[in-house]
Image: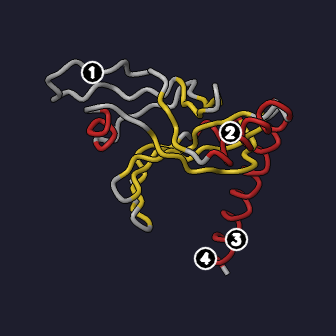
């Protein structure tokens, strides 16, 4: 997708910002097996129903779908297996307390490569209510209309 500061974004979870209010963001390393890296380099990944969780003092990413690499010769791992996230102990402890006490969720926002290493951007998020989503849509529509009116005024006047 884009290449900013040595970062190549592979996939974005566009639905995350629609369904959740992201309060904080973290970057975590992603432990992958075999040809999963090549599959990611081909830009193949799906965030459908994926989420992060702290289990037994470790961070895990569940339900991230990385399809098997089509040119791999040996058997590929399960495409939706849970994958370990690499975070500092301090960050894991903080995330565990926030998700338990505050009712917040860990949501993957994107997958990218930084200096050759696969990373995932996690968002500490709170679920939006239905009315919040509607208000966001209204606000975006109003902004779009205002921009359009500005452009038309500049062209016509």
Q: Residue 56's image quarter? A: top right
Secondary element under disc 3, as helix, strand or loop, is helix
Circle 3 residues within 10 Å: few <14, some 14–19, many ≥20: few
Q: Residue 125's image quarter? A: top right
Identify the mark at residue 150; answer none if there is no mark: 3
Label 1 vs label 3, nearer the camera: 1
**Residue that numbered label 1 is attached to:** 76
Q: What separation in Å lies between label 1 and label 2 (alpha carbons)? A: 33 Å
Secondary element under disc 1, as helix, strand or loop, is loop
Identify the mark at residue 18; answer none if there is no mark: 2
Label 3 vs label 2, nearer the camera: 2
Circle 1 residues within 10 Å: few <14, some 14–19, many ≥20: some
Q: What separation in Å lies between label 1 and label 3 (alpha carbons)? A: 53 Å
Labels 3 and 2: the sequence-earlier one: 2
Which x, y percent locates residue 148? 66, 63
**Circle 4/circle 2 CB separation < 8 Å:** no
Q: What separation in Å lies between label 4 and label 3 (alpha carbons)? A: 9 Å
């Amino acid at each position: 997708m884009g290449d900013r500061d040595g970062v190549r974004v592979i996939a974005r979870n566009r639905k995350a910002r629609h369904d959740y209010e992201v309060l904080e963001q973290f970057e975590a390393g992603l432990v992958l097996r075999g040809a999963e890296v090549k599959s990611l380099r081909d830009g193949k990944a799906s965030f459908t129903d994926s989420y992060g969780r702290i289990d037994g003092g470790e961070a895990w990413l569940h339900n991230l779908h990385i399809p098997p690499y089509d040119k791999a010769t040996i058997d590929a791992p399960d495409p939706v297996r849970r994958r370990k996230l690499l975070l500092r102990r301090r960050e894991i402890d903080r995330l565990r307390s926030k998700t338990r006490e505050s009712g917040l969720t860990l949501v993957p926002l994107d997958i990218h490569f930084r200096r050759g290493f696969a990373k995932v951007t996690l968002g500490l998020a709170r679920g939006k209510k239905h009315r919040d989503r509607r208000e966001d849509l209204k606000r975006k529509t109003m902004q779009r209309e205002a921009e359009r009116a500005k452009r038309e005024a500049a062209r016509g006047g």
